[in-house]
Image (spheres, grey):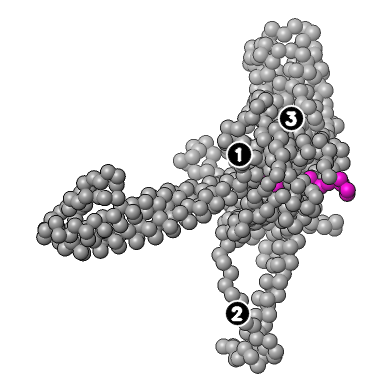
Amino acid sequence: MALDGITCELLTRELNTMLEGRRIDKIFMPDKFTLILHLRTVNGVSKLLISINPGSQRAGFTESNRSNPQMPPSFCMLLRKHLSGSKIVSVTNPGYERIIEFHCTNTDELKDNKEFTLTAELMGRFANLILINGSGKILDSAIHVDYSVSRVREIMPARIYEYPPLQSKITPDEALEYIGNGKLPILEEEMKRPAEKALINSIKGLSPLISRQLCHKADIDERAPITELTDVETSRLNKACKDFFEQITENTYTPRVFYGPDGEPCEFSPMDLDGFDKKAGFKTISEALDVFYQAKESGIDLEGRRNRLTQIVTTAISRLTKKREVHEKDLAEGSKAGMYKLYGDLILTYKYLAKPQDTSLTAINYEEDPPKEITIPLDPSLGASENSQEYYKRFHKAKRKAEMAGEYIKEDDIGIEYLRSLKTAIESASCEEDLEALEEEIRSDTAPAKKADKKVNTGDPNRQVGIAKSGKASSRALREAAKRAQARNKKVSQKKKEVSFRRYVTSDGYEILSGRNNIQNDRLTFQIADKDDWWFHIKGLPGTHVILKTHPGEDMPSDNAVIEAAELAAYYSKSTVLEEHLEGKGSRPGFIKAEVDYCPVSHVKKIPGAKPGMVIYKEYYSILVDCKDHA
């Protein structure tokens, strides 16, 4: 749900308690919608995130790490100028509005105290971050709003800051007074509206979600007008509102995150919401917001990375397919080689029939049975012998083209099959580790070939490198040593970042290993697996290699282990199965079946010169299983 005024008020109270007296150490803006303040205390550094992104507006502490641009936005530089080293005096809210104000104090070059207010307006598509000086003037904002955008309220440097137009609604405190006097907390002009709308239009900071929940807890129809409610329904609605608003005013609420059937977070609220499969409680709204949006954003980031990699591989497949079409045309042209040779032979045989300036020659082709007449085009500017030699040249050229095109088409087919396996792995990726492994494979596949390393002089570097332009004999040696040390550190860091295989355990105790990319598939099958382990792969399609580890002295694993390993192999090729429309026998919506081949690892051989992960195998079994994950 979007951040409503009530949640924003409660969040402001929490932040005021936690931030009062803290100093702003560093300021970063990973993007134009996100501000991260590093706050220094006696206990260390904590990170305060303020987001005005329309899809994830919030403020609160966070543990997530984000990469920052090399050149920070100009608004970030302005904040660093005025707020770096400043102390947060207080955090306020203008009364159940979606606005959070961070009041700071700092000293200038002359040691004079300066006051600033960083205002976060968390109001949907009008969200903004505004820096205001002590006299109430706007120094700058993350998003400029001039007269052409809004005639009501400009957000521009040097303008006096004004709050957005306030609505004439009652606060939760006033709502409790209404209830205490035996009245519904509804404004008189809203009494004829449906209950849900009447609550929203009468009480400040109330969101549609909470309004519906209040109606649900009171067991009334949210679409029924207030004037049509019975006395019993009115009493239940008053009680539901009283219980909720007392939690707000007395700070006895429990922030919660609510999850759907798939385990993904759906909502967050200080109110206990009905109708969700699972919920988790937190100590602060800031913590609940961080958990909620980190899960949301990780899914978005994962999908974004997957789409980017898919686009790269799809483009490569398209490019390779076009190359194959060109090579097919060359192969078709090469098929004319025999005809060109025949033309050359017949022109030499019947050259006595050719006259100067002739454009064609009619001859008898005795290679056909029965012999037939054939008309051969001639170049009138050339004699018979020259025309014959021209056809022989075409013959040799077409022959070479056909031979090369055949080899190129084989390479194209291997490349397309390899890229399709990459695409399948990308679409089947379910976590960051999968995508990291695939990104590494794509980088290694597209990296230029390394040049032969130059011989490095050994011995005393001061004597061998000569005199540098600076006049220091050792300066070049030091630079070279630094480069070598950096290269070593890079290799070490790459080894540390190496992503592990997927690991599973069957319900009867067998270990299953699965590769995240083709390089891992190769290593898993030919280096990690024992010859007595069992290898699984989707039949006739690109997919991951799955290894079922056998127990010592065992010839054949259990039937249950075979089925679970085969289901994993099918699951990580699910996108390819759908693409090929191979919904096997017994498939039904939501339960896709696929055929999986399996055999001992000793029956799997690597194709010489082929891309990683491409193998051949023999003496295998096949099984039809569901595409099912066993994570």
Question: What element does badge 3 sit on?
Answer: loop
Tell me which label, 3 or 2, sits earlier in the chain: 3
- What is the crowding at mark 3: few (fewer than 14 residues within 10 Å), some, or many (at least 20)? some
**Amino acid at the residue labelled 3:** Gly
Judging depth in this view, the residue of 603 and 195 nearest the camera is: 603
Magenta range? 544-554
- Left or right relative to 485: residue 254: right
- Residue sitting at 61 percent across and 76 percent down? 453
Percent coordinates x, y for residue 12 in the rendering: 75, 40
Residue in the picture at 40% in, 52% down? 331
Q: Which residue is mark 1?
A: 576
The residues bearing labels 1 and 2 have C-alpha atoms spaced at a distance of: 45 Å
Residue at image mark 2: 454
Amino acid type, callout 1: Thr
Quadrant location, the C terminus? top right
Look at the numbered discs 3 and 2 and tell me whether their residues touch, using CB distance below 8 Å: no
The residue that disc 3 covers is: 260
Q: Quadrant of residue 621?
A: top right
Residue 292 visible in the displayed image? no
- The image position of residue 155, as x and y in percent, is 55, 44
Front position in the image: 92 or 624 = 624
Q: Nearer the viewer, mark 3 or mark 2?
A: 2
**Crowd rating for badge 2 (residues with CA inside 10 Å; few <14, some 14–19, many 20+):** few
- Label 1 CA crowd tier, 10 Å (few <14, some 14–19, many 20+): many
Q: What residue is rendered at 61% in x and 41% in y?
A: 540
Badge 1 marks a residue whose secondary structure is helix
User: Is residue 166 something one can see in this rendering?
Assistant: yes
